[in-house]
Image (spheres, rainbow, N blue to C red):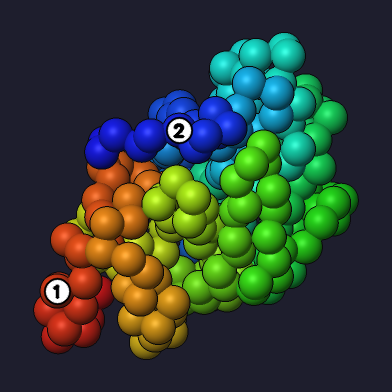
Amino acid sequence: MPSIAPSPGGVRVDRLVTSGQFELDGGSWDVDNNVWVLGDDKECVIIDAAHDGRAIVKSIDRERRVVGVISTHAHNDHINAVGEVCDGTRAPAYLHPADRMLWDELYPVTPDHELADGQVVTVGDVDLHVIHTPGHTPGSCCLYAPALGVLFTGDTLFNGGPGATGRSWSDFGTIIESIRDKVLTLPDETVVLTGHGDSTVIGAEAPHLQEWIDRGH
């Protein structure tokens, strides 16, 4: 992963990889997920609490206050540890309301807060901007921290192309529009921190947009 210098206030990005299963439309696949922690020594947010809630909670220093558990979207492999992590840290859960149908398959309670396009969550001295990027799911969101030059994309954009759109609630044309209009417009040097696999930068992905359109995935 490209190095990410901390902000003057000490906000940094840490990664934990957890493993489990992604289940949708009657299928099940083994997956490794990136769980991202953004914050300083006093507070942080957890992005995409996947699979192993105990490991995620243990990775957070007791001195750090978790101000939120943010889900980029509500596929089970990105939210299946949210309940345990929220219980263990007493932090609220955030989700875009357009993904409630997926959330409701796992949880009988509503998320504590709704994400909205343009919303800002502040952690330490860094603002995290919510960008609604539907396509992989209707409520998919990316999270942009301009002060760090990083973008958390969930499953919207990977190293090598868009997230999958061949299953329920997804649409290829919509994800292309989201990526073209809201993601690839960010500075070329922006580091893309993905929901699975290796990171990339905007400048490495932008030239391939037409290739993705032509191949249809």
Question: For the residue labelled by badge 1, is the local secondary structure a helix, a strand or a loop?
Answer: helix
Q: Position of residue 154 (x, y in %)?
A: 46, 54
Residue 32 drawn above or below residue 150:
above
Q: Position of residue 163 (x, y in %)?
A: 35, 64
- Name the residue located 69 percent from the left edge and 48 percent from the top edge: 122
Q: Is residue 170 visible?
A: no
Which of the 4 image quarters holds residue 29? top left
As drawn, the label of residue 6 is 2
Question: For the residue labelled by badge 2, is the local secondary structure a helix, a strand or a loop?
Answer: loop
Q: Is residue 60 visible?
A: yes
| Of the pair 128 and 85, the residue shown nearer to us | 128
On screen, residue 27 versus residue 216, left or right, reads right
The kind of residue on which mark 1 rests is: Pro
Q: Position of residue 22 (x, y in %)?
A: 47, 46
Quadrant of the drawing holding the C terminus = bottom left
On screen, residue 78 versus residue 214, left or right, reads right
| Of the pair 106 and 206, the residue shown nearer to us | 206
| Of the pair 26 and 168, the residue shown nearer to us | 168
Residue bearing the label numbered 1: 207
The kind of residue on which mark 2 rests is: Pro
- Name the residue located 33 percent from the left edge and 51 percent from the top edge: 191
Marks 1 and 2 sit apart, C-alpha to C-alpha, by 28 Å
Q: Position of residue 124 (x, y in %)?
A: 67, 37
